[in-house]
Image (spheres, helix red, strand yellow):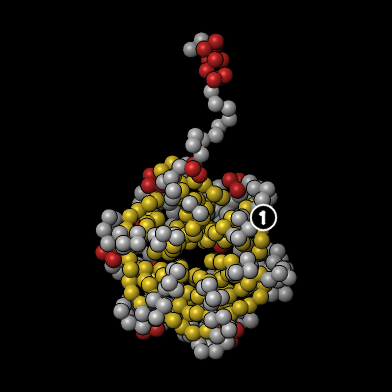
Amino acid sequence: MSRRALALALLLAPAGCEEDPPCERSPGYLCPVIGTGELGFNRDGLDPAQTDLFLVSSVRRGPDDRIYVMDFNNQRLRVIDDDDTVQTVIGSGFHAIADTSATAATTPLENPIDFRFDDQGRIVFVSYHDPRVLMLGDDDRLHVLAGADDGVVGIDGNEGDGGPALEALFIQLDGMALGPDGSIYVSDSLANRVRRIDPSGMIDTIAGTGVAELSGDGGPGVDAALHWPTAMELDPAGNLLIADTRNNVVRRLDADGTIHTIAGTGTAGFSGDGGPATQAQLDQPYGLALDEDGTLYVADRGNFRVRSIAPDGTIHTIAGTGLEGLRGDRGPALSARLGYVARLAMDGDGLLVADQSNSVARRIVLR
């Protein structure tokens, strides 16, 4: 090409390096949100694409329209601020049970794993190795909502049932959900139980016998066995969806207390796309998100995929090839590689994905 032709081509080329159309407006695409893919902590104040994270466990958009990220092994909850830099909201980076006398920025944390926002916009969260449910108050301090104030660990995981949540003991909290009435649902993965803290602060087990097995479908949740329950979602009818992770199924605890399997056969594997979810194989489902149209999204962790279950019960893969890796951003989600995915969260017309082992958060454009 002559110099004149090259100059003309450059003059006519679109300015900048912007995508056309941008990833965020391309249904079916996978877009980066935060993280370099390098495990570590470089500092706050950086652009999301330059920020190192260490095993992202949960990502959600807050009521203030900012995206919050649980930085599991950095012992922090972080946020993409309005100036598009990443800042720490809770956590000093030191590894220990949270100090309720310290400020949010100076308290240690013990592997924070999941969080929600209550009806007043306050952050409520659980940590893997701190057996308490904590809330960030308006006074910039953490407040205990459930569990022993000094962090004592339970033995059976049902200590305190029928009494005040502040006198209850947990073993290993893994997931949580908030009800519209103010109820708090927590999964104790090592206790193989799901418990509910009612608006008055009383606690009870609502699913799981403590025995690690798969049983009880069609009967009361309290008589059913779970194995490592993790993520949970409430549907508009008040039914609680539970990722029964090591049973390789998703279960539904109806508002009347009856439990059912709604996805998975109980045998780990990958199969069933295009057919009934109850006949499909999953491998350690670890994240759930429920769309307003009734579609349930499942982090099929061991299969390195995200799958969708339509209201009619049909299952499909929407992201991931089944091969582990970190590639494919800004392209079709079905051609991308994922790591071990943790929690999912709806984000308007998209789905936020905590790609835990890759230490990044990503977003699937749904529509």
Q: Could you say where residue 66 lies in the image, as x and y percent from the top left?
A: 61, 55
> Which quadrant holds residue 211?
bottom left
Who is closer to the viewer here, 276 or 110? 276
Who is closer to the viewer here, 129 or 244? 244
Image position of 59 (left or right of 305): right
| Identity of the residue drawn at 48% across and 12% down | 1
Three-letter residue code for mark 1: Gln
Count neighbours of disc 1 (C-alpha within 10 A) and say few if under 14, some if 14 to 19, many if 20 or more: many
User: Which residue is labeled 1 in the image?
Assistant: 87
Looking at the image, residue 147 lies above or below residue 116: below
| Identity of the residue drawn at 49% across and 37% down | 21
Query: Which residue extends farthest bottom?
Result: 162
Q: Could you say where residue 105 lies in the image, as x and y percent from the top left?
A: 70, 64
Image position of 89 (left or right of 221): right
> Which quadrant holds residue 118?
bottom right
Looking at the image, residue 7 lies above or below residue 259: above
> Which quadrant holds residue 230?
bottom left
| Identity of the residue drawn at 71% across and 69% down | 138
Q: Could you say where residue 292 lies in the image, as x and y percent from the top left?
A: 45, 60
Q: Can residue 301 be seen in this view?
A: no
Looking at the image, residue 306 lies above or below residue 227: above
| Identity of the residue drawn at 54% across and 81% down | 198
Q: Is residue 54 visible?
A: yes
